[in-house]
Image (cartoon, rainbow, N blue to C red):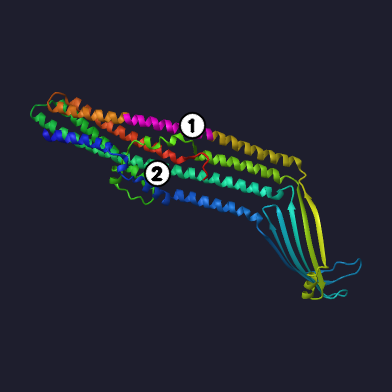
Amino acid sequence: MKNLRIYLIVSLVAPSLVFAQPATSHVSNLENIVAQAANKSETLKSLEVSLESLDSEIKARDLELSSRLNAELSAYKDKREVFGTIPREGTSGIFGLTVVKPFSSGTELLVATDHTLLGKDDTYPERSTAQWQVQLSQSLWQNSFGRSTRLRHQAEEAELKSRKASLEFERQNFLITVENAYWDLVLAEKELAIRKDNVKRSETLEKWTSGRMRQFAAEKTDLLQVQALLAQRKLDLAIVENDLTNKQKNLEQLVPGLEYKSADFVAEKMGDLNSNYKEQFKNKKLRLDAYAQEQRAQQNSFEALRDEDSLRPDLSVFASYTQNGIAEKFDPAWDRALEENHSEQKVGLTLTMLLDSEGKSQQQKASAKASEAAKYRAQALNRASENSWAELARNFENMSEQIKVAKNLFNIQSQKLKAEQQRFQQGRTTTLQMTTFEIDAAESELRLYRLLSQQQKLASQFRLFVSAGSDL
């Protein structure tokens, strides 16, 4: 009798001591597991590579500002008439080199050089023609002083931020899944420990009730009641053991190379987190997908302006300087080409424009509508983000209140069970009443753990939000 009393009291007091410990007394195993998932998960590696690919893709778009080299080496026969009716037959050869460098300011620099070899014929001796040219042009309307290039860079910057935020949203959702799986496993481990303890207490109670029956101090129904409780708790234990295995496999699937240690999960402390997050709810937060859409709307706005710019007439001012020289040999031809008195200077304007006004109108309309649609989507996601943030704060506060009530209920149920144990040992209550109190106390403990686990899962949702005005 005395041993039964001591066992029951200790087994009920121990769980309450676990809840009484501060959450900071144990370094959480969660951070290590999340870090391992972040480093080893194929899912996250794929997202990281995608982001690196996007960064390279955007940088590669500046190839349109890269210098372009054009080289020609050829040989041909020329039987065309020159100087009216003078016939000419001869073999010729040519090599040329042209470098064009566009600048982000809408300026273009052209440097060209070529050398032509004209073969000897009946009319002319063998000779060489050397020529070089420098030309500078500046766009005045289309891409005026680099306007289109600046708009492209701004659009690309917004696109990169948007894609980063979208990938980060996927990444954080995955890590939330890992965290939820972790807390599911912590809860399963704690429930398993409680269920095992329940079975042990029920076995002790059954043994004690069987002894009382042999002494004719208990009824058959008392023993059946205790045996039913024991059978139910063994069934609950079997269900939890299977559930624990499933949750373990789920976490191992999410975290490659996870070394699962049951003791780490049982030792995890779950305390009320409301005080840790109360200050954060005062700051306005933006969900990552809403941030991504904001940036996408900016991207579409810049692209619409760039499309409008690309449809303008292309009016450019240019200035060119050319020199040439003709001689029978290669070197003398280039010597003459470098003399100042064999030059040509030219200054002028070039105009290029699209004549299909209907096509231009439709393209402008399409760009403007795409930009407008992106803004509407951004507004909708912003509103959803604000509602989600407010809901998270409300649920967190509500969960904290539920935890307070659950803790109080668990303490009351524990005290009630201890008082009932004393009455039971004195023969002042029934086995049915005793087992009912046993069930109530165990369920109140599990209910508290479930609420604490749910609160931890709620806290993981903070991963999806960034401060308003932040820059990824």
Indicate whether residue 254 is drawn in magenta: no
Left or right placement of residue 21 versus residue 418 in this view: right
Residue 53's place in the image compared with 276, above or below, is below
First to last magenta residue range: 382-404
Q: How many marks?
A: 2
Q: Quadrant of residue 441?
A: top left
Q: In the image, which disc is placed on residue 387?
A: 1
Estimate the x, y position of residue 135 in percent, counting from the top left: 75, 59
Inspect this view and state whether residue 120 appears. Answer: yes
Could you tell me the amino acid type at mark 2? Val
Q: Which residue is mark 2?
A: 178
| First along the sequence among labels 2 and 1 | 2
Residue 79's place in the image compared with 435, above or below, is below
Estimate the x, y position of residue 60 in percent, counting from the top left: 60, 54
Quadrant of the snapshot with the N terminus:
top left
Could you tell me the amino acid type at mark 1? Asn
Inspect this view and state whether residue 238 appears. Answer: no
